[in-house]
Amino acid sequence: MNVLMPTSLAEACTLCAKHPGVIPMAGATDLLVHWPLRQAEHDKSYLDLSKLSELRGVRWTADSLTLGALATYWDVLQDARIASVFPLLPDAARQVGAIQIQSRGTWAGNIANGSPAADGVPVLMAYDASVTLASAHGTRTVPLRSYYTGYRASVRKPDELIVSIEIPLVACDFAVFHKVGARKAQAITKVGLVITRLASGSQRWRVVASSVAATIKRCPTVEALLNTGTPLKAPADLSAAFAADVAPIDDIRSTADYRRTVLARLLFHSLQGVYDGAAAP
Amino acid sequence: MQTTASNPAASTLQIAFSLNGQAIDIAVDPRERLLDTLRYRLNLPGTKEGCGEGECGACTVTIDDLPANSCLVPTFQVRGCSVRTIESVPKAELGPMLAAGATQCGACTPGVVMTAHWIKQHSQVLESQTLRALMAGNLCRCTGYDGIIDGVRRWIGGPQ
Ligand SMILES: Cc1cc2nc3c(=O)[nH]c(=O)nc-3n(C[C@H](O)[C@H](O)[C@H](O)COP(=O)(O)OP(=O)(O)OC[C@H]3O[C@@H](n4cnc5c(N)ncnc54)[C@H](O)[C@@H]3O)c2cc1C
Ligand code: FES
Ligand code: FES
């Protein structure tokens, strides 16, 4: 095993360029699962980001919140302003594993890992976050909603590192995070739904679904239905729109049918009292 | 600091950190988990391995004063950090836990105590989360949890 331990971001980028295929490591909460059994992983090269102070912590600017690539769930739980401005960030953080995972797991690692069942990613996506990537050739910023290109595939090039996540300071007047798992704590999401509504504008709704497609994704058809104020009398009125946006499957954690049904119900019931078109039966 | 390894087993990394308040500087295999370094290299077997996948919390230690699963930490990541293990918790403090039936087979107990000890020292975390939620990363197959929660409550001096 080859471990590279850069002491600056510039050095990390140079090492990425010099060692094609090197694996970035942040909190290691995904990378080290069942480590002794995964011998093939032991022969690879790793780039330890954990000591890069440039990537630590959360920062506020006049118009955004920036999470450094090493910002953990715990860091977010410690920031009182985040709880009031972006309440879904701590809501999701508290649901990721337990304190031992929250203390080391990073938001950037959650994005880079690319699981369709991730809990940090959908919340960031519903807040219109973007991801800044850096390499020896420079930096670029991509909207998180267009970051994934397929199952565990993304626009990130092998020599690029996620360096930060930016969330624009735009007011929402409604925001909710749902995680359905096998038990209350320490469960992997079998259906996830995040909904936000901007306080003003014309395209106000954001609907992000997890564990119901190859990637976490925005649901543009469902959002269009809400943006136009289409009346909704029952969860079934959402089914066609969801069918256009997501493609749940049967797997070890759940069935396609269960996921489809629960997703529509979660959205329908979340809208009661906040969405004019949603009529209680 | 860098190691190149064509023969991975032969390469080592020199890692300095603080362990239970004492500075140490040791050579480790880059593949070594903190759990293994503690148990097999440093002869501190109080930290247990349950699942090896971050679920059970039997391997809980604190790193820079935050609970962590040592089965998920490569030892080279604690360079420059302060690590505390169950061996650093004074035995005299554990009475209330034992009295409440917080332990049976004992496999989960070191991890339970580490998390509980951390909560005791940072009781403000109970303002935003319940004790049960904060202890959710420490699984126990014996006690049914009520004994653990009662014991931790007594220990940290919260409402019974
Ligand atoms: C017991 C347990 C429970 C968990 N529960 C949850 C849960 O409830 N919800 C959830 O969403 N996740 C959960 N996870 C998964 C994991 O904790 C999260 O995905 C976490 O955010 C990963 O962050 P990390 O820093 O530990 O990533 P690492 O393990 O360090 O890395 C993960 C991946 O991201 C890459 N990477 C990391 N940082 C960067 C970067 N800056 N640039 C480019 N690539 C990078 C790595 O190469 C790797 O492929 C759980 C894991 C465990 C072990
Ligand atoms: S052995 Fe580390 S969490 Fe179970
Ligand atoms: S006392 Fe046996 S696992 Fe908890």
Image: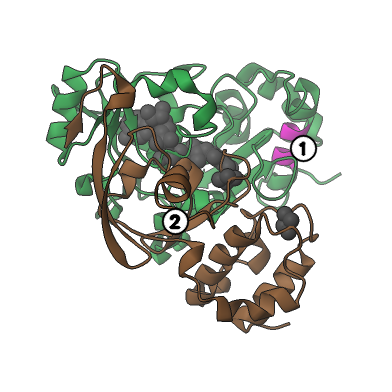
Under tag 1, what secondary structure? Answer: helix
Mark 2 crowd level (few <14, some 14–19, many ≥20, 10 Å Cα): many
The percent position of residue B67, horizontal first and vertical second, equals 48, 58
Q: Chain of mark 1?
A: A
* Residue labelled with disc 1: A265
Task: State whether residue A281 is above or below residue B110.
Answer: above
Q: Which chain is green?
A: A
Q: Which residues are magenta?
A: A262-268
Q: Residue at x 66, y 46 (%)?
A: A275
Mark 1 crowd level (few <14, some 14–19, many ≥20, 10 Å Cα): some
- Residue A105 shows in the view: no
The residue lying toward the viewer, choosing from B97 and A278, is: B97
Q: Colour of chain B?
A: brown
Q: Which secondary structure class fits the magenta region best?
A: helix
Q: In the picture, residue A124 is in which quadrant?
A: top left
Q: In the picture, residue A191 is in which quadrant?
A: top right
Task: State whether residue A169 is above or below residue B121.
Answer: above
